[in-house]
Image (cartoon, rainbow, N blue to C red):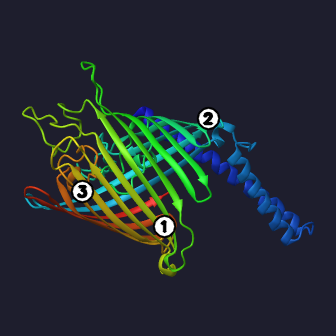
């Protein structure tokens, strides 16, 4: 905790130093005001000087050349978010559960040189890779702050990026149009190589590749790991009049998972098929096609944005219970960034028992297990700049066997 406290203190120093640039800007304001009062400058000339000065300071800070701040400090960017949640969960075989939860995340990006960057982040929660929530309980006890991600990034070429460490965000490593396979909180560990090349004005090719470590044991030679290769393309279809301006993105991921059969992975939901020892019965090498169609100004700009997403999964090892798919639609504003921005989304998903490892899917959908099907609906509304209210509803049930679970969440999100 002492080291984490030092990190937060360093973040405070960064914020304070940036604030000092605002103090400098205030001194310039006072000087220009005096020149206007003495008739040396007109109001119009004063306003132009202030605008140009602030813009120049902003550019110098962005380039790391602002003389009033150390260069290393100007190469660090901070971002973060805070979420307050009420959650109600209805289970068929247990009492309803009501919980208050919070999430706080703080991230930093540091530029090493023109080709190298370092990214690091802290988050609330325990060691569960699928959750950064801190439940409000135990008579006001203090929560945990943990390392969420820490990775180095090398821009090897304009079209090639290499990353290694505890990677930042599964959505930044592969195309993931739904949460059928991956919970959004998961940050893989290992290395990724991303290729992205614009071949024509409206056509781009990409290939996402990763070697991710699943576990390590000093007493075992064959530790489990995952290799993913995901080629794809993105094509802009232009302005189609009443239909809008669609952009189509398609990809197919091949997952090769080594040494998982015959063991139990940490954080398993225990819904995959198991052998007599309680270990995984099958291999989980799988193929996953995905599609996302984004449309700006659909139906003659009735709404600003719409998106259609489809994702599938097939595991060839078992003879049955080895497929999954999800389909969703989203419409409204593309981002919730200001007051009045809104968005509606709906997803239907079906994930059979052995289609995919039960350590990775969305933890809010029947506790992140497989052998589930059901619906998710989301309403988001901006109540101010960088703050929103989000309402999320899950209703899921077992594909085989009995069981149904409903989850209702109301979130207050704040970003900075």
- Decide which of tag 3 and tag 2 comes sooner along the chain: 2
Name the element at disc 3: loop
Per the rendering, the mark at residue 112 is 2
- Most foreground residue, 103 or 299: 299
Provide the secondary structure element on which disc 2 rests: loop
CB atoms at circles 1 and 3 under 8 Å apart? no
Q: Nearer the viewer, residue 410 or 282?
A: 282
Residue bearing the label numbered 1: 334
Closer to the chain start, of discs 1 and 3, is: 1
Q: Is disc 1 surrounded by few (<14), some (14 to 19) or many (20+) residues within 10 Å?
A: some
Left or right? Give the position of 359 relative to 10.
left
Quarter residue 42 falls in = bottom right
Q: Position of residue 386 (x, y in %)?
A: 50, 63
Mark before the other along the chain sequence, 2 or 1 = 2
Q: Which mark is residue 302?
A: none
Q: Nearer the viewer, mark 2 or mark 1?
A: 1
Q: Residue furthest right?
A: 40
Viewer-side label of 3, 2: 3
- Name the residue rendered at 34%, 54% in the picture: 102
Label 3 sits on residue? 365
Q: Does residue 99 lie above or below 389 as drawn?
A: above
Q: Quadrant of residue 82?
A: bottom left
| Residue depicted at x 42% and y 60% | 292
Disc 1 to disc 3, C-alpha distance: 24 Å
The residue depicted at 74 percent of the width and 52 percent of the height is 57
Task: State whether residue 308 is above or below residue 151.
Answer: below
Q: Residues within 10 Å of mark 3 (few under 14, many from 20)?
A: many
């Amino acid at each position: 905790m002492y080291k984490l406290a030092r990190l937060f203190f360093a973040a405070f120093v960064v914020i304070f130093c940036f604030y000092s640039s605002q103090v400098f800007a205030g001194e310039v304001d006072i000087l220009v005001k005096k020149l206007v009062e003495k008739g040396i400058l007109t109001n119009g000339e004063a306003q132009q000087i202030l605008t140009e000065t602030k813009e120049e300071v902003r550019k110098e800070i962005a380039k790391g050349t602002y003389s009033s701040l150390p260069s290393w400090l100007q190469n660090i960017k901070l971002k973060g978010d805070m979420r307050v949640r009420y959650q109600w969960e209805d289970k068929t075989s247990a009492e309803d559960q009501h919980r208050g939860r919070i999430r706080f995340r703080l991230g930093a990006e540091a530029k090493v040189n023109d080709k190298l960057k370092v990214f690091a982040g802290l988050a609330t929660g325990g060691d569960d890779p699928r959750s950064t929530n801190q439940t409000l309980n135990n008579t006001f006890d203090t929560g945990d702050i943990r390392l969420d991600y820490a990775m180095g990034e090398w821009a090897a070429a304009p079209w090639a990026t290499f990353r290694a460490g505890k990677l930042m965000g599964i959505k930044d490593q592969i195309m993931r149009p739904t949460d059928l396979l991956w919970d959004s909180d998961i940050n893989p560990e290992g290395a990724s190589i991303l290729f992205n090349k614009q071949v024509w004005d409206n056509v781009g090719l990409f290939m996402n590749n990763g070697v991710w470590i699943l576990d390590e044991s000093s007493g075992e030679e064959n530790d489990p790991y995952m290799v993913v290769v995901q080629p794809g393309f993105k094509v802009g279809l232009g302005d189609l009049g009443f239909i809008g301006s669609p952009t189509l993105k398609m990809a197919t991921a091949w997952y090769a998972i080594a040494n998982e059969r015959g063991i139990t992975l940490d954080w398993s939901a225990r819904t995959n098929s198991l052998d007599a020892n309680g270990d995984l019965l099958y291999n989980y090498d799988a193929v996953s096609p995905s599609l996302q169609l984004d449309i700006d100004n659909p139906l003659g700009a009735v709404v600003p944005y719409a998106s259609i997403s489809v994702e599938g999964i097939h595991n060839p090892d078992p003879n049955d219970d080895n497929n999954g798919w999800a389909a969703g639609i989203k419409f409204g504003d593309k981002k919730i960034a200001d007051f009045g921005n809104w968005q509606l989304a709906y997803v239907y998903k079906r994930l059979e028992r052995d289609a995919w490892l039960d350590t990775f899917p969305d933890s809010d959908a029947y506790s992140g297990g497989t052998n589930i099907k059901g619906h998710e609906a989301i309403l988001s509304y901006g109540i101010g700049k960088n703050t929103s209210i989000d309402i999320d509803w899950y209703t899921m049930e077992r594909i085989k066997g009995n069981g149904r679970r409903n989850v209702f969440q109301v979130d207050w999100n704040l970003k900075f």
